[in-house]
Image: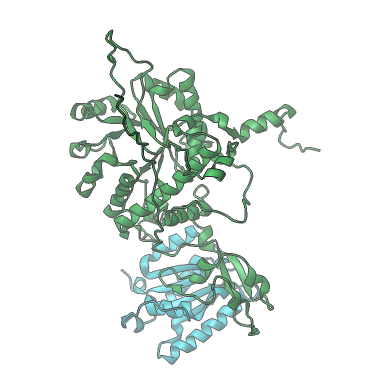
């Protein structure tokens, strides 16, 4: 197994991302096996800091979200909201001593938007530089309420 | 002195269901996109007013990253309409839309999940919003001329409606000796209380517990589970009375597994006589069902099979409900033609027809019987009852998203019992509404149904056909 496949990555992606059907998702799961977990979301704006934090707490070394190009969100501001929430989450995890780049956002370029597979490749490449998360070695507490 | 006997009515066949919770949160059709930024902080926020407490009782299922907000929402859209800044949106859930395929649609899968969880018939309060007609079974409408009956008395009311069938052929006539004793051999029949037989599906993330759970469910329901002969061993041997071993010419016959079973399935092919002889020599009382693919013109083949002395035949369609060699023909048409050919030749009661392939809803069972089947096999519905999403990841070696292989046998059995309980109720409802009291009478009763193709032809056929490239003025 390669070093790249040892990483566990939580990847949220907007359903408007090009070539992001269930078939493509399964192809990526075959390629990366259990090293990535893909979660389609109706809009990038659906993501909340808690999604990232719970992913980091439970299983992920890093958590990323893929959103539409700026100005092209189907719900007008979803991608902008996601950007702010990623920033907010980074501040939270940095305050407890984790590296901020464990949380990330990838905005699909407006010119020549990339397919989900290409975006995932890029994210996996970035995330592979990270050390294994210290949080995952801590004792896991039972699931807590959302608030 | 007149000897009096207390006469007992036979016990009604009832399937007792109870709520069996899902192990994973089901995917829902729509999701809420709530944006907190820009909130005016109204004193009476629409989120606080939600009558279902969707926003108050939120939690996140980390395994699937499913928010309880989506599962609990009842789509009243009060929050969407009421927010003064219009911050709340609802959207179609992409994971829900990706469920299944064109035959096993997301709505069918979600209905089966609901039936397996509650054991009840799903009710849509907002009325039926779907198309009036469609392909396959959707082009059939069943007679509801006596709809008053289930409304008045309930489907489990005073009058008993029998869903029992007999498997096996019956002779054309009986012969008696001069002293009045029966001269001819009485027919060998297997009776079952409902016309639905379970079948292990062709794929799925299955474990020994899954198969055992289905067998437990079949025993509880009084029906059968058809499964490959070679996997009947260990704990499954205790369920043999409710198993149908499927014999494969590629595998040796396992006689231990056949001892005590009432029915076996053999593929119709070159070796059918040889296999039949081997089974009959060792297990003379067992009935044999012969499986043949449902193809165009299968009725000719069935007539010749009946002439060979076969008493049960299983017509197998594809998993999308079509005949195997023509994707444009639905199994309902194949079953109907076979039934009519047998009736025309005076052979219908000499054979039991079982049909299967792509039966996805309770109404499909009733409609198959109306088209001429005696009973039906269901395979994927019993897998979907275990929360299967028909994603087919298991066929690629990917992990099952709902870990079906890790489910307890008792949970599997209860889910299947619930599913069949709901289907049984729907069958009773259909029969009750058309005034039929016995499912044996429903067989081939096409007078109690309307077919879109027939209506279309009789209503508009005289107008001629529209040639391609021309438009009506």
Residue found at the very far top of the displayed protein? B178
Residue at image position (51%, 60%) is: B96
Question: Where, quadrant-wise, is the C terminus of chain B in this rendering?
Answer: top right
Residue B147 higher or lower than A68, as above or below: above
Where residue A113 appears, as percent x and y from the top left, is 58, 68
Q: Colour of chain B?
A: green
Question: Which picture quadrant has residue B141?
Answer: top right
Indicate whether B1 appears above or below B214: above
Can residue B100 be seen in the rendering of this structure?
no
Chain A painted colour: cyan
Say which of A113 and B182 sits in front: B182
Report whether residue A49 is seen.
yes
The quadrant in which residue B467 appears is top right
- Please state which of residues B125 and A111 is positioned toward the viewer in this rendering: B125
Q: Quick check: B104 left or right of B222?
A: right
In terms of depth relative to the viewer, which is nearer, B346 or B298?
Answer: B346
Total number of numbered discs in the rendering: 0
Q: Position of residue A45 (x, y in %)?
A: 57, 75
Residue found at x 41% / y 23%: B349
A118 left or right of B280? right
């Amino acid at each position: 197994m390669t070093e790249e496949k040892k990483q566990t990555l939580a990847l949220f992606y907007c359903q408007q991302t090009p070539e992001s059907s269930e078939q493509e998702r399964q192809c990526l799961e075959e390629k990366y096996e259990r090293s990535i977990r893909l979660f389609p979301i109706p809009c990038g704006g659906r993501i909340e800091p808690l999604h990232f934090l719970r992913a980091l707490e439970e299983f992920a070394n890093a958590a990323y979200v893929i959103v539409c190009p700026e100005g092209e969100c189907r719900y007008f501001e979803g991608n902008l909201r996601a950007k702010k929430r990623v920033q907010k989450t980074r501040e939270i995890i940095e305050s407890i001593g984790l590296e901020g780049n464990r949380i990330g956002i990838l905005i699909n370029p407006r010119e020549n938007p990339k397919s989900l597979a290409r975006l995932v490749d890029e994210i996996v490449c970035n995330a592979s530089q990270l050390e294994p998360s210290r949080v995952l070695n801590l004792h896991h507490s039972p699931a807590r309420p959302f608030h | 002195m007149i000897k009096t006997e207390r006469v007992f009515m036979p016990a009604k066949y009832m399937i007792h269901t109870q709520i069996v919770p899902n192990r994973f949160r089901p995917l829902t059709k729509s999701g809420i996109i709530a944006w907190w930024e820009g909130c005016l902080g109204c004193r009476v926020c629409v989120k606080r007013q939600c009558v279902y407490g969707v926003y108050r009782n939120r939690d996140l299922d980390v395994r699937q990253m499913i928010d309880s907000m989506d599962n609990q929402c009842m789509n009243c859209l009060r929050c969407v309409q009421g927010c003064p800044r219009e911050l709340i949106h609802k959207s179609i859930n992409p994971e829900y839309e990706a469920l299944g395929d064109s035959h096993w649609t997301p709505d069918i899968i979600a209905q089966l999940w609901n039936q397996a969880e509650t054991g009840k018939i799903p009710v849509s309060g907002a009325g039926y919003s779907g198309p009036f007609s469609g392909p396959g079974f959707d082009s059939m409408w069943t007679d509801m001329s006596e709809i008053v009956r289930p409304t008045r008395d309930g489907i489990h009311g005073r009058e008993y409606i029998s869903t029992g069938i007999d498997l096996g052929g019956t002779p054309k006539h009986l012969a008696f000796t001069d002293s009045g004793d029966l001269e001819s051999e009485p027919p060998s029949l297997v009776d079952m209380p409902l016309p639905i037989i379970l079948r292990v599906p062709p794929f799925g993330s299955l474990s020994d517990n899954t198969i055992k759970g289905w067998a437990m469910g079949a025993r509880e329901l009084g029906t059968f589970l058809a499964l490959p002969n070679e996997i009947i061993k260990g704990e499954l041997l205790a369920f043999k009375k409710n198993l149908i071993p499927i014999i494969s010419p590629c595998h040796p016959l396992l006689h231990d597994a056949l001892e005590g079973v009432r029915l076996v399935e053999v593929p119709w092919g070159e070796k059918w006589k040889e296999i039949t002889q081997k089974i009959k020599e060792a297990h003379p009382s067992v009935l044999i069902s012969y499986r043949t693919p449902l193809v165009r013109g299968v009725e000719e083949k069935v007539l010749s099979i009946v002439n060979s002395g076969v008493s049960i035949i299983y017509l197998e369609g594809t998993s999308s409900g079509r005949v195997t060699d023509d994707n444009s023909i639905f199994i309902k048409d194949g079953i109907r033609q076979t039934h009519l050919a047998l009736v025309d030749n005076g052979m219908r009661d000499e054979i039991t027809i079982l049909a299967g392939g792509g039966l996805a809803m309770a109404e499909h069972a009733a409609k198959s019987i109306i088209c001429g089947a005696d009973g039906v096999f269901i395979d994927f519905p019993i897998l979907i009852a275990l929360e299967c999403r028909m994603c087919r990841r298991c066929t690629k070696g990917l992990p099952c998203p709902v870990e079906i292989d890790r489910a307890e046998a008792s949970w599997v059995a209860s889910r299947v019992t619930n599913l069949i309980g709901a289907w049984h109720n729907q069958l009773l409802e259909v029969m009750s509404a058309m005034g039929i009291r016995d499912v044996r009478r429903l067989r081939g009763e096409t007078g109690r149904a309307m077919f879109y193709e027939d209506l279309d032809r009789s209503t508009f056929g005289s107008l001629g056909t529209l040639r391609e490239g021309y438009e009506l003025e």
